[in-house]
Amino acid sequence: MSTVTIERANHNRQLPEGWRWVALGEVCQIIAGQSPVSETYRKTPGGLPFFQGKADFGNRHPVARTWCIEPTKVAQAGDILISVRAPVGPTNVADVECGIGRGLAAIRTGIHADRDFVLAALRLYEDTLAELGSGSTFEAIKRDDLESLEIPLPPLAEQKRIVAILNEQMAAMARARVAAEVQLEATKALPAAYLLAVFNSHEAQQWPKKRLGELAAIGPDNGVFKRRHEFGRGVPIVNVSDLYRSLAVDLNSVERVEASDYEQRRYAIASGDLFFCRSSLKREGIGWCCYVSEVSEPAIFDCHVMRVRLDPEKACSEYVAHYWAHPAVRERVIGNSRTATMTTMNQDDLAEVNIPLPPLSEQRRIAARLSEQMASVEQTRKALEDQLTTINKLPAALLRQAFNGAL
């Protein structure tokens, strides 16, 4: 049997004093899963919970969706469960006696190895385990591979000391992650709350309403069809993907395309133009709206986009774009769309949407305030996502410290 060595072959590093490389089979019993006959499966509780692979894993313990009245291979409560078929490497801990299928193996630690220490080692070297399984026809590892897998192991007392520190610090990281996730979800809910506060107010109910078509000086009209080989140089072109980045399209960040003089005149973009997603693979993206605040060079728009140029004496583009993001408006637009291969909306549907219109000065004031609020939300969202990225990297860094003898 060939020995599979984690990390040592790659780094040839010295272990901390008192540690040694140990094959997993020396300190643990490996139980390979096996699938029982199909007639023994149950979708309601009966027999033992039956787990087949990574799809059954939770954060720490697997979640029962299937039961088996005659399991062939059984794991005990407390056993480590490891996915041995694609994806190879993820782990959980059995919290009850359970049957295991071919996609899993159970690792039962003996008297010389602490279960949570072995679990930490497997999680630290999960990528290496995945590489080990990638050489087969389909991604998988065998019981022999796990038995011969070498991990660095200190004396049992040191294992327990390290595990106590790991558990305490991992719990603190989990609390920090949950707190950041709660803050992020609350932040993501703010844009809708701000829009509801404006457009669902008693004052807004008194504003007169006009159809978008009545407010348009030009449009709605569709953009130009361009082939892929025409992209890469030429004038800026607004595509569907540009509509989802922010409320205001930055023409400096869009693709460029070759365009004739006629196309540049026919599909020319002007400051204040509104753009709407005309066709989308995802239904929730249909009708999404943004506007162009500044045009410094000739630019055009794509055929999957509709353009509306408002009469500046009637409506403010930034105000209309904010209103279009209102949840009720989004629901109405999506509800009126047509779904075949792609979800689409036509010019008539777009023109018929009613817009509540306070005086122009009030439109501009509302738009400026909403834009300020949305910018603040975006800044907070990015900061929280960066914080979560940092938090999510901490467990791996802590595990590396632990197995370098730095705890």
Image (cartoon, rainbow, N blue to C red):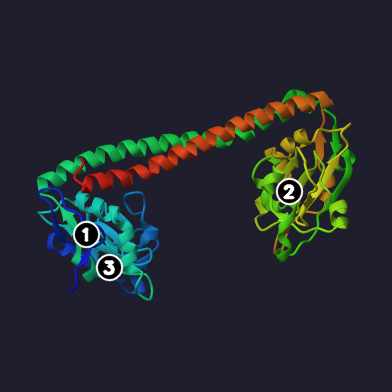
Residue type marked 2: Gly
Cα distance between the residues tagged 2 and 1: 55 Å
The quarter in which the N terminus is drawn is: bottom left
Give SS at disc 3.
loop
The quarter in which the C terminus is drawn is: top left
In x, y percent, where is residue 153? 15, 53
Residue type marked 1: Arg
Which residue is found at the position 74% from the left and 52% from the top? 237
Residue with the mark numbered 3: 33
Residue with the mark numbered 1: 8
Q: Earlier in the sequence, mark 3 or mark 2?
A: 3
- Mark 3 is surrounded, within 10 Å at the Cα level, by few (under 14), some (14 to 19) or many (20 or more) other residues, namely many
Foreground label between 3 and 1: 1
Residue with the mark numbered 2: 287
Residue type marked 3: Gly
Cα distance between the residues tagged 3 and 2: 50 Å
Give SS at disc 1.
helix
Give SS at disc 2.
loop
